[in-house]
Image (spheres, rainbow, N blue to C red):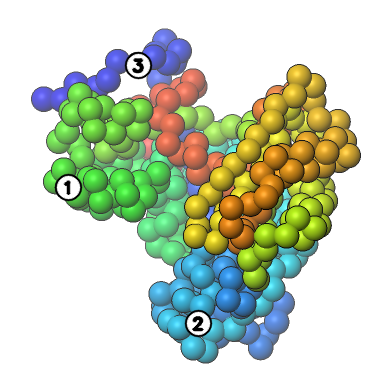
Amino acid sequence: MAKEPPSTDDDDDEASGLRKIIHVDMDAFFASVEQRDNPDLRGRPVAVGGSSGRGVVAAASYEARRFGVKSAMPSVTAKRLCPDLVFVKSRFDAYREASGQIRAVFRHHTDLVEPLSLDEAYLDVTEDRLGIGSATRIAEMIRQEIRIKTGLTASAGVSYNKFLAKLASDQNKPDGLCVIRPGQGADFVQSLPVRRFHGVGPKAEEKMKRLGIETGADLATKDIAFLRANFGSFADYLYRAARGIDLRPVRSHRIRKSVGGERTFNEDISSGSALRETLDRIVDIVWERVENAGARGRTVTLKLKYTDFQIATRARSVPYLVADKAQFAQIGHALLEEALPLPMPIRLMGLTLSKLDHGDAARDDGGDGDGDAADRQSRSGGRRSGAADASQLSLF
């Protein structure tokens, strides 16, 4: 019989209790906003992103997904799969406006909201603001309020921890609701293919298949020693996930680790003047994001992707916080000059500011999608998602 790995957390002495967690995920958010605002697009396969040879699909409507079109797919591939695909350019102002309306709905019910991106968030409604008590009822109300205020649909998952709630929100998409009640988590997880586990990508899935692990049930048969030998630091997460265990609380503020941006070119570039001009444009974009995040950092990283898809990075750390755009640009240009002349043309350039000051000004209220990385963590402080008494179960 497999033993649970020893805990290194501080929550072993915490009182046990039941959390009521909702994960809300908007349905094809960017594409849905475009279809809402342009009636001619409704019912048609829509992709948000560039349609050029180097373009990438940022989001796809459900009509497009039926043809296999996915986010992050090259536009040429998407067009081949769906010849009638309609491409529209991103309108982030419209997406942010809708996201603000959605977050206002969340905060009408609880102060414990952890945004993962513009269209996705965890909510802890264990003690909801309106005194409703039932997490399922609150999720239904939130979905209805979002539809009324934004004209958009949302899917929601309700459970007693974040891992299960996020799995549940994907179960009945689009415009669906799924509830995993206390006592049901382990059985629900064991019925799933491991690819559904957040953090398990194609490479991890392939490795698991070689080891005879294709479902949560297969994973649950492996002891912690086996998992650590094969998956290293990822093992503890996998062990707990296979049993439906997740101790992380919903955090209303998350620490942003970096702020950056990048550009993919329509044609490869290599001349010094074109590279410098491109870097100046990226500096403008990234520094606006730095200002919006209220962040300051000490490390600047330049990313170059060559025409053969090889990636090179150069970084420089300074003993002071980069105070303004001029300093940021100066360090970025110094890194670029060190890389010149390039061994071959590049297809992409990026610039990032990291080692951020983690004071209050550097806290992130979501929006850059880095919450998915948190799903790889299986530990945190806070109350355990354990057994519940009858009164708690009746209000779930």
| Residue furthest top in the image | 13
User: For the residue marked with disc 1, what is the amino acid?
Assistant: Arg
Residue 370, position in %: x, y?
57, 43
Q: Secondary structure at mark 3?
A: loop
Q: Are marks 3 and 2 in contact (CB under 8 Å)?
A: no
In the rendered view, does 245 fall on the left or right side of 365? left
Residue bearing the label numbered 3: 7
| Identity of the residue furthest to the left in this view | 1
Specify the label residue 79 is tagged with. Answer: 2
Secondary structure beneath label 1 = helix
Q: Secondary structure at mark 2?
A: helix
**Could you tell me residue 125's position as x and y percent?**
55, 38
Crowd class of label 1 (few under 14; some 14 to 19; many from 20; radius 10 Å): few
Q: Which of the two residues, 340 or 255, is positioned nearer the viewer here?
A: 340
- The residue sitting at 69% across, 47% down in the picture is 340
Q: Residue at x 77, y 60 (%)?
A: 274
Residue 12: x %, y % from top left: 39, 13
Mark nearest the camera among 1 and 3 is 1
Q: Is residue 309 left or right of residue 279?
A: left
Q: Quadrant of residue 150?
A: bottom right
Q: Is residue 67 visible?
A: yes
Identity of the residue drawn at 51% across and 30% down? 249
Write down the quadrant of residue 160 in the picture. Answer: top left
List the residue tagged with mark 1: 210
